Structures are given as structure tokens and as C-alpha cells.
Image (cartoon, rainbow, N blue to C red):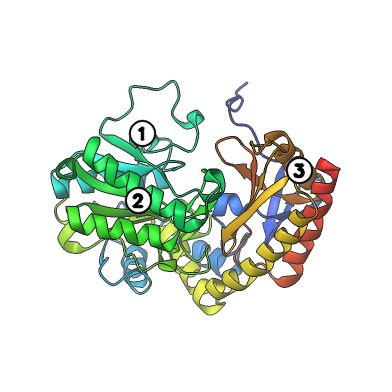
Amino acid sequence: MATLSPLLKQATPVLAARGEGVYLYDTAGRRHLDFTAGIGVTGTGHCHPRVVEAAQRQVATLIHGQYTTVMHEPLLRLTEALGEVLPASLDSLFFLNSGSEAVEASIRLARHATGRQNIVVFQGSFHGRTMGAAALTTAGTKFRAGIGPLMPGVAVAPFPQSYRYGWDEDEATRFALRELDYLLATTSSPADTAAFVVEPVLGEGGYIPAPPAFLEGLRERADRHGVLLVVDEVQTGFGRTGRFWGHEHSAARPDVLITAKGLASGFPLSAIAAPAALMEKAWPGSQGGTYGGNAVACAAALATLEVIRDEDLVGNARRQGVRLHDGLRKVAADHPVIGDVRGLGLMQACEFTAPDGGPDAAAAQRAHKAAAGHGLLLLTCGAFGNVVRMIPPLIVDDAQVDDALALWSAAVADAVG
């Protein structure tokens, strides 16, 4: 008898039977408020009727049209639709299945386009688990331990983690940019550096937004040294942060943008976007794949874009993000173990801190478990597992946010007394 790998540990005890909107229902019929959204995937909620209808219609028409063999209409329409929401200069797209694959494709493109080998990432980054992506990931050793040697040519610079350093945002930003300059002078010569790869908000690294001045500093240095700025929007894209793209909280614009997760409301689909003049520098045969740009996933992504537009989900994420953030701060004010509340839009987190200033992973885990017991599904993150994150679907309303905050308050009280 076959079983799942023992390494696949569930974050919650729920055996899901069905999903509807912001809720998951287990096999016993109990309703759970889902503030995980499948790790930021189901932005339009579980089984949005328009996404379901689009996928069902496409399944009955064409399931798999392998896009280096034949072309299909959903892929062409999605490419056109994404052109309306991407930065104007990013007018060429390559579709894949997962975030990790898209990250790998961006590395290939950056190295081919520049003729340089080195990639600079930032402390706390998460870019995936495949071998190249894992080499770029520094959110925790569990993502890269025991599989070395990893892909060479990766250098790691500080990310402006204000709370961790005990500095304000401006000081942390100055430090991170100064250390990047030092890295370019000592470790990875600009002449050898193909790309800076950065998340607008650290994901697995602890839900830490990049200050606008930091992203703008990266853009200035990329321009100065002929380095490509690759922005990993796998988790921050499609309205999650209250802007359509997370980098739009700054004036910086990427040379390459990576998207996945919320792109197709739960169907596997990812992409990289770049200027056509840059994309054509990829070597022949370096882009392809059996399932990338799947017709059903593309149909779901088209419906997702329509729902985001028609229901103003980006604006809702911005408004509900403020409501959620303010409520989390009120809970934190009653419980000093929560040392920091941070995030953008509907990408919010609480960091649990011990009296000595160190991470309190045990308290975070207790609160996370207690929340599930109350019917609120959450996830943890951060290098020490001491950050509890909230990622509700972008359709969440006032009452559901308030319900989640009440459940969270009760869970924290249960966890820390």
C-alpha cells in the first residue's frame, strides 16, 4: 500500500472536502476561515464561479495544446491580457508551471542576455526548491541543506530587515545598499554580475516589505553596472500587496518580472516577463516545457484577471489590508510577545519575540495551532519559525477580517495567557 512521503507535513489538521470563497470545509462539515489561500494562490477565493465556469468550458474544448507544438487561443488571449497589467516595457512572456521553474528560467535568461554568470540575492530570500532556485534561497537552511554542492555564482547581500537589526527603515536601507556596494567591490565584480534577484516583500523570510528606497537603490545600481533587476513577484503579484505588483510601491521597475501563485486561482501556471529585445537574447532551446501555458490554466488565468478587475480586488486588498494590519496591532498591544506587526495589503504577519529580544518560535507555534483550533487557518514563516502570516483571499470583506481578528485574539490569549 502506497502512502504519501513522510516529509509532507500539514500546517493544519484539516482534511479539506470543498472550498467556497474565503472558507474551507472539512470532511466533517466544519467551516474554516482560510487565511492561507493555498500560500497566496487562491486570490479570487476558493472556486470562484467565473473561474470554475471558464475552466469547465475549456476542459470540454481543449485540455492540452503543447505550446511548442501547436498554439491555442487561451494562451494568446492571456498574453494580450497580461500586457495590460504589466509594466509597459515588459512586452514578452514565457509561460511555465511553477514559481521555481520561472525563477530558473529568469536565471537562464539573465546569464544568456548579459554573458555574465553571477546572481546576487538578498538575505532571507525564497525563490524555490529546485537546484538553481534553492541556490538563490536563504530563508532557511531546510530549503538547501544536504543537497550541495549548489549552483555556483550566487552572492548574498543583506536585506533591510529593520526589526531584526533594531534600526529604523532608513538606516536599514542605507546599510543594505552600502553592503551591496561592498559586495560588488569584494565578492562579485559588476563585470561578472548578471542580475539582482529580489522579492518586493520577503515571503518565507518573514513577510518583510522592501522599503521603496531599497528597490530604487537596486534599480540605480543595476543601471549603473549593466546588471538586470529581476523582481520575484511569485507571492506579491496579482494584487496581493494592494497594488497589482508589489514593486509598484516604489518607483523602481524591473527588467524581468516573475509571476505565479495568484495568476490562475489555483491552476499551475507561472511566467516570466521581459522586454522583447531582452527575451530574444535567450539561446535557442533554452525555453520550453511540456505543460507550460496549459490551456485550462490559461483560461482560468483569464477569468482571474477579469474577476480582479471587475470586483476591484486590488483596491479591496489595499483597504482590507489596512483593516487587518490595524486589528493585528491592537492584538499585539495586549500581548508583548508579539514584537512586530508588518506587511503590505493582504500580506500581513506577526513576529513573536522573547523578552531577551530573540525569536520565540514556541509561542508562535502555539498561537498558530490555537488559531486552527478556533477555525482560523494560518501559516508560519521566518528563519526561526517565529512569524505567523495571514494571506486571505483578495475577496475577503470587513466582517470576515473582523471575524479573523477575533479568532486570532483568542488564539494568542490561549497561547501566551
Q: Amino acid at mark 1?
A: Ala
Residues packed near mark 2 inside 10 Å, few (<14), some (14 to 19) or many (20 plus): many
Q: Is residue 289 visible?
A: no
* Residue carrying label 2: 177
Quarter-of-image position of residue 257: bottom left
* Residue carrying label 3: 367
What kind of element bears circle 2?
A: helix
What kind of element bears circle 3?
A: helix
What kind of element bears circle 1?
A: helix
Residue 332: give x, y in percent of width and height. 74, 54
Quarter-of-image position of residue 135: top left
Mark 2 or 1, nearer chain start:
1
Q: Quick check: 195 left or right of 261?
A: left
Residues packed near mark 1 inside 10 Å, few (<14), some (14 to 19) or many (20 plus): many
Residue 168: give x, y in percent of width and height. 52, 55
Comparing 372 with 46, the one in front is 372
Residue 126 versus residue 250 in the image, above or below: above
- Report, in whole angstroms, how far the alpha carbon at label 3 lies from the one at label 1: 32 Å
- Report, in whole angstroms, how far the alpha carbon at label 2 lies from the one at label 1: 22 Å
- Report, in whole angstroms, how far the alpha carbon at label 2 lies from the one at label 3: 35 Å
* Residue carrying label 1: 135
Q: Amino acid at mark 3?
A: Ala
Q: Residue at x 29, y 59 (%)?
A: 219
Mark 2 or 3, nearer chain start:
2
| Picture quarter with the C terminus | top right
Q: Quick check: 171 left or right of 410?
A: left
Q: Is residue 242 visible?
A: yes
| Picture quarter with the N terminus | top right
